[in-house]
Image: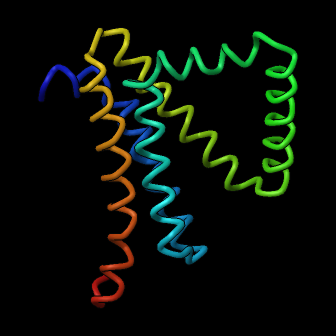
Amino acid sequence: MTQLTQRFWLSFALLFSIYATFGWFLHLWQVSQLTWALVIIFVVLKAGVLTVLWKSTREFVLLGFQSDMGYLIMVLLLASLFVTALVWLQVFAYILMIVAAGLLVRVDLLTQSIDDVIAFATLLIIPLLALAASWLPLILASRGVG
Protein backbone atom coordinates (compact mmCIF):
# COMPACT_ATOMS: atom_id res chain seq x y z
CA MET A 1 0.00 0.00 0.00
CA THR A 2 1.43 3.36 -0.96
CA GLN A 3 1.94 6.21 1.44
CA LEU A 4 -0.88 8.15 -0.25
CA THR A 5 -3.52 5.48 0.39
CA GLN A 6 -2.27 4.70 3.91
CA ARG A 7 -2.78 8.26 5.07
CA PHE A 8 -6.04 9.08 3.35
CA TRP A 9 -8.05 5.86 3.20
CA LEU A 10 -10.86 7.24 5.41
CA SER A 11 -11.41 10.43 3.40
CA PHE A 12 -11.07 8.46 0.14
CA ALA A 13 -13.62 5.91 1.38
CA LEU A 14 -16.00 8.69 2.41
CA LEU A 15 -15.70 10.38 -0.97
CA PHE A 16 -16.22 7.05 -2.75
CA SER A 17 -19.26 6.09 -0.67
CA ILE A 18 -20.93 9.47 -1.10
CA TYR A 19 -20.56 9.39 -4.87
CA ALA A 20 -21.70 5.74 -5.03
CA THR A 21 -24.76 6.63 -2.97
CA PHE A 22 -25.44 9.63 -5.18
CA GLY A 23 -25.14 7.40 -8.26
CA TRP A 24 -27.63 4.97 -6.73
CA PHE A 25 -29.97 7.91 -6.00
CA LEU A 26 -29.75 8.92 -9.67
CA HIS A 27 -30.59 5.35 -10.69
CA LEU A 28 -33.65 5.32 -8.43
CA TRP A 29 -34.89 8.52 -10.04
CA GLN A 30 -34.16 7.06 -13.50
CA VAL A 31 -32.52 10.25 -14.71
CA SER A 32 -31.63 10.85 -18.33
CA GLN A 33 -28.24 10.48 -19.95
CA LEU A 34 -28.01 14.27 -20.02
CA THR A 35 -28.18 14.31 -16.21
CA TRP A 36 -25.38 11.73 -16.02
CA ALA A 37 -23.32 13.87 -18.38
CA LEU A 38 -23.96 16.93 -16.19
CA VAL A 39 -22.89 14.97 -13.11
CA ILE A 40 -19.64 13.99 -14.81
CA ILE A 41 -19.06 17.61 -15.84
CA PHE A 42 -19.73 18.62 -12.21
CA VAL A 43 -17.13 16.09 -11.03
CA VAL A 44 -14.52 17.48 -13.41
CA LEU A 45 -15.32 21.10 -12.53
CA LYS A 46 -15.29 20.43 -8.79
CA ALA A 47 -11.97 18.63 -9.02
CA GLY A 48 -10.55 21.48 -11.09
CA VAL A 49 -11.85 24.23 -8.82
CA LEU A 50 -10.50 22.51 -5.70
CA THR A 51 -7.06 21.92 -7.20
CA VAL A 52 -5.71 23.37 -10.43
CA LEU A 53 -8.10 26.34 -10.72
CA TRP A 54 -8.13 27.23 -7.01
CA LYS A 55 -6.24 30.53 -7.29
CA SER A 56 -8.25 31.90 -10.20
CA THR A 57 -11.53 30.80 -8.59
CA ARG A 58 -10.61 32.46 -5.31
CA GLU A 59 -9.65 35.68 -7.10
CA PHE A 60 -12.93 35.63 -9.05
CA VAL A 61 -15.00 35.20 -5.88
CA LEU A 62 -13.05 37.89 -4.03
CA LEU A 63 -13.54 40.22 -7.00
CA GLY A 64 -17.27 40.04 -6.30
CA PHE A 65 -16.78 41.51 -2.85
CA GLN A 66 -15.00 44.63 -4.11
CA SER A 67 -18.08 46.54 -5.26
CA ASP A 68 -21.73 47.08 -4.40
CA MET A 69 -22.74 45.32 -7.62
CA GLY A 70 -20.64 42.32 -6.59
CA TYR A 71 -22.38 42.19 -3.21
CA LEU A 72 -25.76 42.38 -4.92
CA ILE A 73 -24.90 39.53 -7.27
CA MET A 74 -23.60 37.42 -4.37
CA VAL A 75 -26.79 38.03 -2.36
CA LEU A 76 -28.96 37.12 -5.35
CA LEU A 77 -26.94 33.96 -5.96
CA LEU A 78 -27.17 32.94 -2.31
CA ALA A 79 -30.92 33.61 -2.27
CA SER A 80 -31.36 31.50 -5.39
CA LEU A 81 -29.27 28.75 -3.82
CA PHE A 82 -31.44 28.86 -0.70
CA VAL A 83 -34.65 28.53 -2.74
CA THR A 84 -33.12 25.66 -4.70
CA ALA A 85 -32.11 24.00 -1.44
CA LEU A 86 -35.69 24.19 -0.16
CA VAL A 87 -37.24 22.89 -3.36
CA TRP A 88 -34.75 20.07 -4.00
CA LEU A 89 -33.73 19.28 -0.45
CA GLN A 90 -32.47 15.73 -1.06
CA VAL A 91 -30.42 16.68 -4.14
CA PHE A 92 -29.04 19.71 -2.34
CA ALA A 93 -28.05 17.55 0.63
CA TYR A 94 -26.19 15.16 -1.69
CA ILE A 95 -24.38 18.03 -3.39
CA LEU A 96 -23.46 19.54 -0.03
CA MET A 97 -22.04 16.19 1.15
CA ILE A 98 -20.16 15.78 -2.13
CA VAL A 99 -18.55 19.20 -1.79
CA ALA A 100 -17.73 18.60 1.88
CA ALA A 101 -16.13 15.22 1.16
CA GLY A 102 -14.16 16.73 -1.72
CA LEU A 103 -12.92 19.49 0.55
CA LEU A 104 -11.93 16.92 3.18
CA VAL A 105 -9.85 15.00 0.65
CA ARG A 106 -8.32 18.23 -0.63
CA VAL A 107 -7.37 19.35 2.88
CA ASP A 108 -5.84 15.94 3.58
CA LEU A 109 -3.82 16.20 0.38
CA LEU A 110 -2.78 19.79 1.14
CA THR A 111 -1.50 18.87 4.60
CA GLN A 112 0.91 16.44 2.98
CA SER A 113 1.91 18.90 0.20
CA ILE A 114 0.61 16.66 -2.57
CA ASP A 115 0.96 18.23 -6.03
CA ASP A 116 -2.13 19.86 -7.55
CA VAL A 117 -2.08 17.54 -10.57
CA ILE A 118 -2.10 14.44 -8.35
CA ALA A 119 -4.83 15.98 -6.21
CA PHE A 120 -6.86 16.73 -9.35
CA ALA A 121 -6.44 13.15 -10.56
CA THR A 122 -7.44 11.84 -7.14
CA LEU A 123 -10.52 14.06 -6.94
CA LEU A 124 -11.45 12.95 -10.45
CA ILE A 125 -10.73 9.22 -10.38
CA ILE A 126 -12.37 8.32 -7.05
CA PRO A 127 -15.76 9.92 -7.87
CA LEU A 128 -15.79 8.47 -11.38
CA LEU A 129 -15.02 5.00 -10.01
CA ALA A 130 -17.79 5.40 -7.44
CA LEU A 131 -20.30 6.49 -10.06
CA ALA A 132 -19.28 3.51 -12.18
CA ALA A 133 -19.66 1.23 -9.15
CA SER A 134 -23.21 2.49 -8.68
CA TRP A 135 -24.04 0.76 -11.98
CA LEU A 136 -22.91 -2.66 -10.71
CA PRO A 137 -26.17 -3.62 -8.91
CA LEU A 138 -28.17 -2.82 -12.05
CA ILE A 139 -25.83 -4.79 -14.29
CA LEU A 140 -25.88 -7.78 -11.94
CA ALA A 141 -29.67 -7.61 -11.63
CA SER A 142 -30.10 -7.50 -15.40
CA ARG A 143 -27.97 -10.64 -15.74
CA GLY A 144 -29.94 -12.45 -13.08
CA VAL A 145 -27.13 -12.55 -10.53
CA GLY A 146 -28.18 -12.00 -6.91
User: Quick one: 78 or 27, which is closer to the camera?
Assistant: 78
**Relative height, residue 105 to residue 139 (above, below):** above
- Using residue 45 as the reference point, say whether residue 89 is left or right of it: right
**Relative height, residue 76 to residue 25 (above, below):** above
The single residue placed furthest to the left in the displayed view is 1
- Using residue 114 as the reference point, say whether residue 52 is left or right of it: right
Quarter the C terminus occupies: bottom left
**Relative height, residue 66 to residue 82 (above, below):** above
| Residue at the image position 37 percent from the left and 30 percent from the top | 10
| Residue at the image position 32 percent from the left and 31 percent from the top | 120
Quarter the N terminus occupies: top left
- Using residue 12 as the reference point, say whether residue 86 is left or right of it: right
Percent position of residue 85, x then y: 79, 47
| Residue at the image position 59 percent from the left and 40 percent from the top | 97
Coloring applied to the structure: rainbow
Percent position of residue 79, x then y: 87, 38
**Relative height, residue 101 to residue 4 (above, below):** below
Percent position of residue 139, x then y: 32, 79
User: Quick one: 113 or 25, which is closer to the camera?
Assistant: 113
User: Quick one: 47 or 131, which is closer to the camera?
Assistant: 47
- Using residue 6 as the reference point, say whether residue 106 is left or right of it: right
Percent position of residue 42, x then y: 49, 48
| Residue at the image position 80 percent from the left and 27 percent from the top | 74
The number of numbered discs placed on residues in the rendered structure image is 0
